[in-house]
Image (cartoon, rainbow, N blue to C red):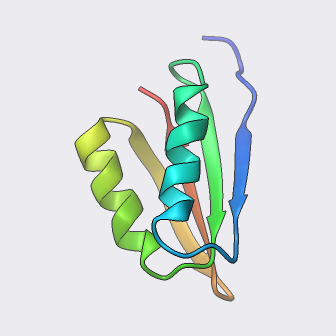
Amino acid sequence: MTDLELIEVDASGLACPMPLLKAKRALNAMESGQRLRVLATDQGSVRDFRVFAEQSGHLLLDSAEVDGIYTYLLQKR
């Protein structure tokens, strides 16, 4: 597999469900295997992204929180 560009979505300042909706829109436009980094400030996004990955089949490779910024790394299936 070739190195595919990492796509980033900044959903900082947006409340639920907008971070997840922006991520879904980005994933729909991506190729299988491509990675998406999402930045969010909504505390509820932690559960949202975990459940979304389980239900959609996309891989949640990493999630972290630093100073109120939640970062998610997903790989499109």
Q: Is residue 72 above or below residue 34?
A: below
**Quadrant position of the N terminus in the picture:** top right
Q: Quadrant of residue 19?
A: bottom right
Where residue 20 sits in the image (x, y, percent)? 48, 56
Give the residue displayed 62% in from the left and 42% down from the top. 36
- Side of 2 where 15 appears, left or right: left
Q: In this orientation, which residue lies closer to the viewer: 17 or 34?
A: 17
The residue sitting at the top extreme is 1
Where residue 64 sits in the image (x, y, percent)? 55, 70
Q: How many numbered discs?
A: 0
Where residue 8 sits in the image (x, y, percent)? 73, 47
Q: In this orientation, which residue lies closer to the viewer: 53 or 65?
A: 53
The residue sitting at the left extreme is 55
Q: Quadrant of residue 35?
A: top right
Give the residue displayed 37% in from the left and 64% down from the top. 48
Give the residue displayed 42% in from the left and 78% down from the top. 44
Q: Is residue 57 above or below residue 14?
A: above
- Side of 27 where 4 appears, left or right: right
Where residue 42 sits in the image (x, y, percent)? 54, 79
Give the residue displayed 71% in from the left and 20% down from the top. 3
**Quadrant position of the C terminus in the picture:** top left
Q: Is residue 77 above or below residue 55?
A: above
